[in-house]
Amino acid sequence: MNGSTALPSRRLNWGFWTVVFSILVVAFLGVTVLRFSKGLGAVTHLNDTFPWGIWIGFDLLCGVGLAAGAFTLTAVVHLFNLKRFEPIVRPTILTGFLGYTFVILALLFDLGQPWRIWHAIIYWNPHSVMFEVAWCVMLYTTVLAIEFSPVVFERLGWHAPARLVHRMITPLVIAGVILSTLHQSSLGSLYLIVPSKLHPLWYSPLLPLFFYISAIGAGIGMVVLESYMSKRAFGRNLEMELLEPLARAMVVALFIYGLMRLQAINRNQCWGDIASFSYEGKMFLVEFVLGVVLPVAMLSFRRIRTSPSGLVTGSFLAVLGFVMNRLNVSITGMERGLGARYSPALMEYTVSLGLVAIGMAVFAFAVRYLNIFPEGQREGGS
């Protein structure tokens, strides 16, 4: 295929979504000016008692976790040699790269002194979990950029560097899997130091493992949702023959994760919070039912798993439950221990939604002008 061909053939209907996107971006830019000119206090409800809010819980913890499909799919294709999944590797890598890039941008908003974000490169503190997360995120973002670079090289007609990257792909994937394993789990390690503050419904010495396994399950769910949204926006065929086996893997990951969570709750003896329908108990039930019970129950049946609507619904529930888990760990589970309630300010939501909107716009731009999807997946299979 000629790398200079404009992709895909179908034009997007930008009418309504252009208006929504424009409003979000204008609001996002306005909040950005306020945040960097007036400080965190002018745009957030954060304070010394509750210093981490939705920008950590959603932008960072969810952004990194939902990008886990990138290392999962690249490992499946390039390490386990399951080449049939190759058609969905490029969009998955693009999603991962955009996810990590916007996580870094979100950190600039959350850090009190964002101009010092580079300090982790120079001032080493190998005993700090944050130091390890910072380095792994920087390195893995670089790995994703290199893995995605052949798509750009093909568009520019630079075939020699594209071939060079293809020859390096196996060590790159191995590095990506190692780095992802380290920082996906280390995000859970951040909360190991607050056993007296994080509610026992979410605290466990196995938090790093919980974060890692749940990221694999939700990352696969995000791959399905990304394929579905691309189908709706660009008139592509939904690759059911590829997504259905991934859904089976997602069921296994979520089932293991669910069992481990229940064992941790039993060990912490906090069934009473669930039975009494306390605030934390209700939030846990919503998270667990939406993110584990329903997806596993639905996608365990082949009839539902092979149905596009059933597959997408189950994947959406898995992703939604994952998001709720990260918000519960970072916000709900900390409120009682800190003795404070936290409700994000409207401008905090604006930044998060603005970053999501810009990320989706960049993805759409890349799909239009780069060879992200194979020819056969376009509308009509042409």
Image: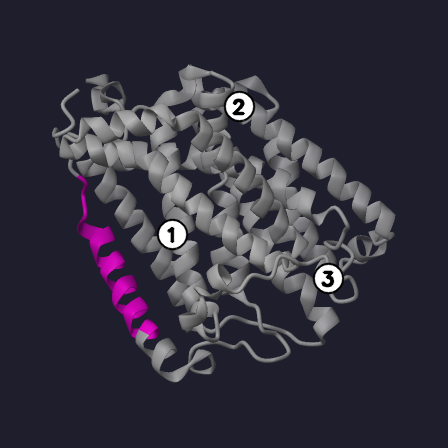
Can you say whether 339 is above or below 71 in the image? below
Q: Which mark is residue 153?
A: none
Can you say whether 206 is above or below 47 in the image? above
Q: Secondary structure at mark 2?
A: helix
Please state the horizontal and vertical placement of residue 20, each as a whole percent of the image.
26, 58
Q: Amino acid at mark 3?
A: Ile
Which corner quadrant of the image does residue 334 belong to?
A: bottom right
Can you say whether 55 is above or below 235 in the image? below
Out of 120 and 245, give the one closest to the viewer: 120
Tags 2 and 1 touching, CB below 8 Å = no
Tags 3 and 2 touching, CB below 8 Å = no
Please tell me which residue is depicted at 39% across the width and 45% down the height of the picture: 142
Please state the horizontal and vertical placement of residue 91, each as a whole percent of the image.
34, 34
Please state the horizontal and vertical placement of residue 336, each as a whole percent of the image.
73, 70
Q: CA distance from mark 2 to mark 1?
A: 35 Å
- Residue with the mark numbered 3: 193
Of labels 3 and 1, earlier in sequence is 1
Please state the horizontal and vertical placement of residue 106, each as a whole percent of the image.
42, 62
Q: Amino acid at mark 2?
A: Ile
From the image, which quarter does the C terminus lie in? top left
Please tell me which residue is depicted at 86% across the width and 47% down the height of the picture: 267
- Front label number (3 vs 2): 3
Q: Which mark is residue 101?
A: 1
Please tell me which residue is depicted at 41% across the width and 40% down the height of the picture: 143
Please tell me how crowded label 1 is: few (under 14), some (14-19), or many (20+) other residues with Cα within 10 Å.
Answer: many
* Magenta-span inclusion, residue 29: yes
Which corner quadrant of the image does residue 248 belong to?
A: top right
Of labels 2 and 1, earlier in sequence is 1
Tags 3 and 1 touching, CB below 8 Å = no
